[in-house]
Image (cartoon, coloured by chain):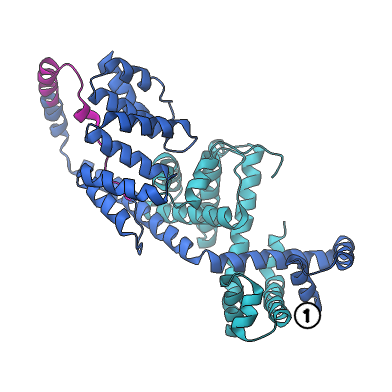
Amino acid sequence: MQDQDYNAFEDYLSGNLDQEAVKIFETRLGTDPDYLEAFQTYQNVSQFVENHFNNAEKSEAFKSQLEKVSSNYFQDASSTKTKKKRINPWFYSIAAAAILVIGLFIEQQFSNPVYNDFANYGTISLTVRGSQDETLQKAETAFNNHNYKDAETYFSELLITDANNMEYQLYKAVSLVELNKYEKADALFNDIMKTPSVYKNKATWYLALSKLKQKDEAACVDILKTIPEDAEDYPKSQKLLNKLD
Amino acid sequence: MSQKNIHEDQKYIEGLIQNNAFVIQSIYDKFAPKVINYIKMNSGDETQAKDVIQETIITIYNQATEKKLQLTCPFDAYFFLLCKRKWLNQLKKTGNKEVTINEEVLSKDDDVQELAFETTLFEEQHELFTEMFEKLGQACKDLLKATFKINTMEEVAESLGISYAYARKKKSLCIGSLTKMVQKSPRYNNLKS
């Protein structure tokens, strides 16, 4: 291709050709396979370069987040493995016996499952390396330190500018449950459950826990039954369901 | 929009685009074990599995942001096929032939095959473009950076002290020479879809 061909590609793509010229250009694309191939490659290359510059920061943020999740995942996987290796086989039978005794004891003492047995929200990770958002960092730290009063304040603050962020809504609702503000919390969970988002099933599980904390076992059971089998929390929900039934 | 239905697992693609930690985590929790298992059964170890999974997710992310990837099949099958192919290619490169190809775990679903093929093609193209872009002269890189970082070509022309028509022409020549380099590369012929 000659320089003027690339010129024509650019003019065509940026809408700088008049109707007449567009017609001539498109006719040539339809009749000259080499021209068409060069044009398609030009278009692909152009898209690539545009993405390369426009999404460079986002792409870096994504890669560092991915690295974080990946390292955690593989670290967890290998640490459980090495732990397993060190355990003496005798330990299992002793541990099993001990667990049985403790289990029987607990079973007799408290037959009703309590909220604290199941409310394990884990550690959340919202910030990415190099992120400048101070509120987000504060929200994450407060939540992870079980300081739900502050966490609730920070998540509310974040939601002012990012009202549709399901992740913030979810953690705000969890904080509200911890603060015994059930009405607000349950309303938020219900909102999330109506959306097709990935947090839908999480919200359902947390709503069930909220009901458990409110000692409304009937509602808890009803909600637990709606958690689908492919949900991450399905096994836990079944366990709780068995205890409640 | 294509005439094919978008699979509900498109939520994973959207989650990746949004850099959603929760979604990335759930991809690992749900889909990584199968890949790790496969790689371990085929002369690999956990570190290699980690790299394969990470590279595959980055490719999906790139295709999603650059080409608006639309999932027409379950994420599980698509992701596994991509990881598997990547691993088999690596084994081929290192000359290690001890592979027990377990075809039953492979989906025979046409949509999966087709989509995975498109993604592999995209990845190879992306690699070739990246390599060629690095070879481009600094003047071109600067001009292109300006044209895509600044909103309009008029502003670009103004910032560079040249006319709008001239700036557009320069841009077309820079992308043109990149196009030429790409087309001349021996790898280019394998990439034609």
Q: Position of residue B9 (x, y in %)?
A: 53, 38
Chain letter, blue in picture: A
Q: Nearer the viewer, residue B122 or A153?
A: A153
Type of residue at label 1? Asp
Side of A81 where B13 appears, left or right? right
Nearest to the observer: residue A25 or residue B89: A25
> Can you tell which quarter of the image residue B114 is in?
top right
Q: Is residue B61 left or right of residue A138?
A: right
Q: Quadrant of the N terminus of chain A?
A: bottom right
Q: Residue at x 15, y 26 (%)?
A: A96
Q: Is residue A121 magenta?
A: yes
Q: Would residue A145 be seen by someone viewing this image from the given angle?
A: yes
Which residue is more in the foreground, B74 or A217? A217
Q: Residue at x 34, y 54 (%)?
A: A71
For this orientation, the residue located farthest to the front is: A160
Q: How many marks?
A: 1
Residue A199 lies, with reference to residue A66, above or below; the image says above
- Quadrant of image for the C terminus of chain A: top left
Asked where in the image residue A189 lies, by quadrant, the reply is top left
Chain B drawn in what color? cyan
**Magenta-drawn segment:** A99-125
Which class describes the residues within 10 Å of circle 1: few (<14), some (14-19), or many (20+)? some
| Residue picked out by circle 1 | A3
**Magenta-span inclusion, residue A120:** yes
> Could you tell me residue B95's position as x and y percent?
52, 60
Q: In this picture, is A169 found above or below A10?
A: above
Q: Position of residue B52 (x, y in %)?
A: 46, 54
Which structural element holds mark 1? helix
Q: Find the residue positioned furthest to the top.
A: A245
Chain ID, mark 1: A
Nearer the observer, A198 or A19? A19
